[in-house]
Image: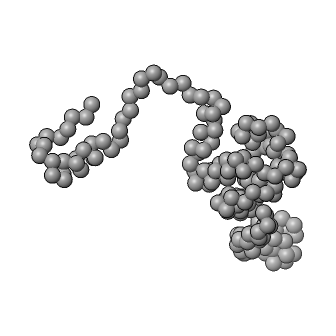
Amino acid sequence: MKRCGRCERERVVPITLDDTIDAGGHSFTAQLPAEKCQACGRIVIEGRDFKLFEVRVAVELARAGIRDKEAFKRLRKALSMDRAGLAHVLDVPGEFIGYWEGGQWPVDPRANAVLCSLVLARFEEKPSALDCLRVLRQPKPLARKVRLQLVDATGKAAKTLQFGSAAHTAPAMA
């Protein structure tokens, strides 16, 4: 058995614990792994498990498109962004983030959509949304002439030949 950090007894056992986060007018509940000391009653939830719960709440808020001050702040924090960083990404003055999160202004729908998109992209491990925003700030130079490789061009050509083509050789691909 594991030793308790409070009472020093070896009476710590694994448990699951229901925890709730209220956000954006909704109540989110999840079962979290935890440890409980049977001697003193101390319960410990690992920080990474609670952080995962917070991120999952942010993802659900993003999927629902909840647009209020609390949800906006929770989405920003799920990305581990400070106000200045988010303002930079959204290309707005830093105080705008404070106005939206403080409720002085309604949350801008475009800013909320971008923030929701970033949270979903991070959860789905598809960073393309952030890459697109980065390109807006620092455009990538593009050559005058660009040669593209078509990944499945040969497969598509073979399929065309399969359905009634009289050609006897595979088309040349340059």
Residue at 85 percent across and 45 percent down: it is 98
Viewer-nearest residue: 118 or 21: 118
In the image, farthest residue toward the top:
144
Q: In the rendered view, does 158 fall on the left or right side of 116?
A: left
Q: Is residue 52 above or below residue 33?
A: above
In the image, farthest residue toward the bottom:
38
Viewer-nearest residue: 161 or 50: 161
Place of residue 90 in the rendered image (x, y in percent of width and height, measured from the top left): 72, 40
Q: Is residue 66 something that shows in the picture?
A: yes
Q: Is residue 48 above or below residue 44?
A: above
Residue at 63 percent across and 33 percent down: it is 136
- Asked where in the image residue 1 lies, by quadrant, the reply is bottom right
Place of residue 49 in the rendered image (x, y in percent of width and height, measured from the top left): 71, 62
Q: Is residue 1 something that shows in the picture?
A: no
Residue at 22 percent across and 48 percent down: it is 160
Quadrant of the frame with the C terminus = top left
Q: In the rendered view, does 137 fall on the left or right side of 19?
A: left
Place of residue 27 in the rendered image (x, y in percent of width and height, measured from the top left): 77, 70
Q: Is residue 107 above or below residue 168?
A: below
What sort of colour scheme is used for the picture?
one colour
